[in-house]
Amino acid sequence: MITLYDYELSGNCYKLRLLMSILGIDHKTVPVDFYPGREHKSEWFLKLNPLGQLPVIDDDGLVLRDAQAILVYLASKYDPSGTWYPRENPALLGEISQWLAFADGITGTASAARLHDALFYDFDIDAARAGAHRLFRILDEHLWFVEQEGRQWICSAPQPTIADIACFPYIMLSEEGGISRQDYPAIRRWCDRVKRIKGFIVMSGVFPAGPARAAA
Amino acid sequence: MATHCVDRELLNDWHIVADRESLSQDKPFPTRLLGVDLIVRERAGSFEVIRDDTGVALKSAERYGFIWTCLGTPRRDIVFIPEANEADRHLVSGGSIAVKVSGLRAVENFLDMGHFPFVHTGWLGEEPHTEVAPYNVEITAEDEVLATECKFYQPIASPTAREGFVVDYIYKVIRPYTVALYKSNPIQKHRLDVITLFVQPVDEENCIAHPYLCYLKDGMEAATVRSFMQLIFAQDKPILENQVPKRLPLDPRAETPIRADAVSVSYRRWLRDRAVTYGAIPAQV
């Protein structure tokens, strides 16, 4: 069985819980006292991940770190539909990788701003917020064109992919870092679509979608 | 926003300004209290609190694992928590978290059971169990706001709860920015777990919540208690940060209470009577 080394308030841990819920993957979690205990820098945890970062999974002895890498692994191994990470479609895999890297950029900006504002991390808050707005603007424009083409998800596929899961958490938590989503209507519509994926779960700070609009 | 505090009750009282464990020896920790910028720094094995504007060292103390300070002359001691002397309890910080709202709003939210099914869905409440049964509110001889006989159905009331049950609560507002919650322990049912929320008024529209947990150790790890506290508090945080206005209105006509808000009504009146205005929108006379 998969063990997830987990911290409730981490958006990067949440994206794994979210995908595992959607795919119905049975797992157990080991809570790591990230704050204020800094257990991710403790000796026992550094043996698991020398980078001292969450999340980490252990799947029957296979230890993996890095949220995006773990999404790739989980979808490749446990998604029978093959739509979350379509291994047979090189163009789509390229697109997904591109947006997984983009998700890392969101972590480096929007998540950093949240850590600064709520947990007193000593980051350059103006740079973090400006960086997040730059990425949100790019994603919002991208999603606007996606909608114009009659699609719903970040990559050119009829179903959501792990790119959607990777980008979602720290966008959804951005206001805790003082980053409003008011100017990004296409992002807001996409967030609501993610929240309506079957198997969607919340984390603290993320609320479920309102009742769906009745069919006209 | 960094307006000056004129409330003597607050200026002459102790407030937490840092969690001792998160401080480092070589790096001063900047914070703010009642609109005044402060530096907490190590000096000869203990910590001192310096006003950033004048460089003057303030009265400071270390208790319950936190660094405390007083901007004026303390008129009374730091809040006494009897449970902190009981050896069979975990005594830990739940983790200090900054919230962009008046600390008085944070205290009031802590007192509110009505939001449990909607904000803490599946944990501290769930539909259709939304009714807040009548409870008692009184002002104690020690001049605290005390709410008793509070009962609420909770699906997962604590980290060790295995099924939903009706949980008994007692709430006590001890000082304007300090509130405690007493909750029946799921194993030793005659004893109470205690969470004291010390709120640091950063300025009128920002605060830092410093939860101090006194949980019976029986069947419970300290890290589990802490993680449960953060799970719950992080659900409240976005709700608190979206409250408008950010300060707490003390005029009885400003917001419309219902019966479930009895303790909040008493709290607001108690703040008015004590002339607490910092973090509040004072009542129009």
Image: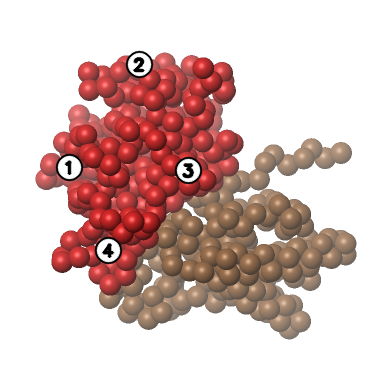
**Which sits earlier in the primary sequence, circle 2 or circle 4?**
4
Task: State the hue of chain B.
Answer: red
Label 3: how many Cα within 10 Å (few below 14, some 14–19, many 20+): few
Three-letter amino acid code at disc 4? Arg
Give me the disc on residue B41.
4
Query: In whole angstroms, how far apart are the C-alphas of marks 4 and 1?
Result: 26 Å
**Which sits earlier in the primary sequence, circle 4 or circle 1?**
4
Q: Is residue B186 visible?
A: no
Q: Would you name the residue on which mark 3 appears?
A: B3
Q: Would you name the residue on which mark 2 appears?
A: B136
Three-letter amino acid code at disc 1? Ala
Query: In whole angstroms, how far apart are the C-alphas of marks 3 and 2?
Result: 36 Å
Label 4: how many Cα within 10 Å (few below 14, some 14–19, many 20+): some
**Which sits earlier in the primary sequence, circle 3 or circle 1?**
3
Q: In this rendering, would B100 be left or right of A190?
A: left
Residue B19 versus residue B160: which sits nearer the camera? B19
Front label number (4 vs 1): 4
Residue occupying the point 57% across, 66% down = A126
Check whether the beta carbons of the residues at disc 3 and disc 2 lie within 8 A of each other: no
Label 1: how many Cα within 10 Å (few below 14, some 14–19, many 20+): some
Task: State the hue of chain A.
Answer: brown
Q: Residue furthest bottom?
A: A90
Query: In whole angstroms, how far apart are the C-alphas of marks 3 and 1?
Result: 35 Å
Q: Would you name the residue on which mark 1 appears?
A: B84
Residue A200 versus residue B19: which sits nearer the camera? B19
Residue B48 versus residue A112: which sits nearer the camera? B48
Q: Secondary structure at mark 3?
A: loop
Front label number (3 vs 1): 3
